[in-house]
Image: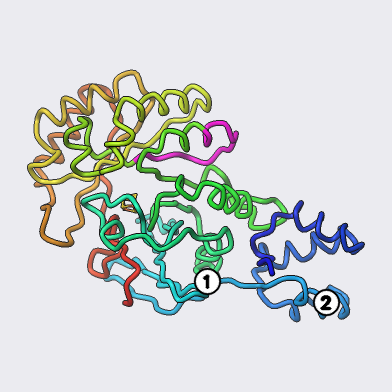
Amino acid sequence: MNNILDKSLSELQADFASRSWPAFRAKQIFTWLHKKVTFDFAQMTDLPKELRDELPKHYKLYAPTVTKVLRSRDGTKKFLFTLNDGKRVEAVLLKDNTNRKTVCLSTQAGCKLKCAFCATGGAGFQRDLTPAEIISQVYRIAEGGPDISNIVYMGMGEPFLNYDNVLKSLRLLTAKEGGNFGQRKITISTCGIPDGIMMFADEELQVRLAISLNAATDAVRSRLMPINRIYPLAALREALLYYLQKTGRRVTLEYVMLDGVNDRQPDLKELRKFCEGLDVHVNLIPFNPFGKHFRPSKLQAIHHFLNGLAAAKINAVMRQSKGQDIMAACGQLAGKPL
Ligand code: SF4
């Protein structure tokens, strides 16, 4: 039986038509699910009782639940979700200085890509998340009260390796009759899957794109991100150019700063070269330590990068790390019991 929470409004309407149920009932149910965030047919009080009784015979209604919450000293919260097959994923709620609240969500349980600086990669891959499992992370966190202003697809998993479900989740979150979340308030972050970037450019969405770059030479990037051996920087840059030309939207390049690995003068020179002619914005991210392989760059090295990029007229900022004390910061999600 299909999960009704995975269905778009048009799919639901087609289902209803095939059962000779009125199309407007499909819209009512979609609104209950995605706007009122009600996951119990019995509570959908403006539906006739016969329909409420009939729905569970045709659809499952399943949204993962939060099984644990950790609170950081800086106000960040990490949520552990347990899926119906027992797999675990994590999402994070971050608050900035202006009280803007951002949900960082996961798209896969684990990840295949094994980036060396990321705890998720080290934990292995389990499975893709369904659209319902992706959007429920936002719905469940919002249920607790916060008014979510931004959503970033930067948690566990590579979004473009779960392309169809991620796309569907975006359409559900932004549907006018549902969550009606602003597309420009959503960012998808990829490790650089060229096909995914080009397909995404063709979707004609207003959703923002970020690329986890982390090095601008193939030697260093392949060491940090094994995916670079399959899709080297030249292929990534070509896809990025296609995206920029097609959408006209600036792309964010994420660069995790690792002491002595990608923060030296030649690394800066290569990064400047990579950015030349591209409408990009660089986020320098101080490494959030876990394991023994890397150390965070010294503040001086980060400032040297910031100045070097500014001198080349490349927009760059240092991103503040949040939630380190609860292992909720960038690259620290592992989906382990909290
Ligand atoms: S950084 Fe992203 S793509 Fe790389 S291992 Fe971690 S979750 Fe996977």
Under 8 Å from ligand 1: the CB of mark 1? no
What's under tag 2, amino acid-wise? Glu
Image x and y of residue 62, in percent? 61, 72
Which numbered tag is attached to residue 54? Answer: 2
**Which quadrant holds residue 271?**
top left
Image x and y of residue 185, in percent? 51, 47
> How many residues crowd around disc 2 within 10 Å: few (fewer than 14), some, or many (20 or more)?
few
Camera-side residue of 100 and 16: 16
Which numbered tag is attached to residue 227? Answer: none
Image x and y of residue 152, in percent? 44, 51
Inspect this view and state whether residue 2 appears.
Answer: yes
* Mark 1 → mark 2, Cα distance in angstroms: 32 Å
Pointer 1 residue: 145
Residue drawn at (74%, 55%) of the image: 9
Asked if residue 213 is positioned above or below residue 293 in the image, the reply reads above
Residue drawn at (68%, 68%) of the image: 36
**Which quadrant holds residue 257?**
top left
